[in-house]
Image (cartoon, rainbow, N blue to C red):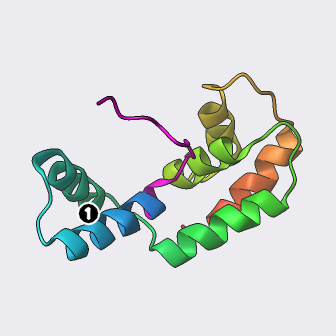
Amino acid sequence: MAQKILSQTPINVTELHAEMKRIKERDKELGFRAQKTLDYLESMNVLDAKKGKELFDKLMKLEIPRLRDMHFHKIVDSMPSNQKDVKIILQGYNVTVSAEACKKIADAVAEYV
């Protein structure tokens, strides 16, 4: 029987790391790919889940036009340190963001770096 996808929601690295740890505690052992993913996440400098959620919520409250939650998840994943880095991250999407909005995003992220 084919599996059916019920929904798709983007998540960031901090949420993924917390979910992978929860699954490992539940199942005691992860599969090969899941373990490789967890090893990679632990080698990265990942925020804890609480701070990642706080940063995501703070970015959402900025109410920057044309940016959706998937864009903010990507920003949380990348943690850009300045306005130029924010612009580079968002180049992969078909959105334009003002320099002022990029500065607001960079300032919000700087508090968590």
Q: Position of residue 48 (x, y in %)?
A: 44, 74
What residue is drawn where x is 38% and y is 65%? 19
Image height check: is 89 above or below 26?
A: above
Instruction: Decide if residue 30 is on the left or right side of residue 4.
Output: left
Left of 22 or right of it: where is 33?
left
In the rendered image, residue 4, in percent from the top left (x then y), is placed at 43, 35
Q: Which residues are magenta?
A: 1-14
- The quadrant of the rendering that contains the C terminus is bottom right
**Residue 89 % position (x, y):** 60, 36
- Residue at left 16%, top 50%? 36
- What predominant SS class does the magenta segment belong to? loop
Based on the displayed image, in which of its 4 quarters is residue 102 positioned? top right
Q: How many marks?
A: 1
Which amino acid is tagged 1? Glu
Q: Is residue 88 above or below residue 32?
A: above
- Given residues 7 and 35, the one toward you in this image is 7
Is residue 22 rendered to the left or right of residue 30?
right
Query: SS at mark 1?
Result: helix
Please, which residue is most extreme toward the front here?
Answer: 1
The reply to whether the magenta stretch includes residue 60 is: no
Point 77% across, 27% down: residue? 95
The quarter holding residue 98 reads top right
Taking the view exactly as shown, the residue that stands out farthest to the top is 94
Quadrant in which the N terminus is drawn = top left
Residue 20: x percent and y percent? Answer: 31, 63
Q: Residue at x 21, y 51 (%)?
A: 34
Is residue 111 visible in the rendered image? The answer is no
Q: What residue would you read off at disc 1?
A: 42
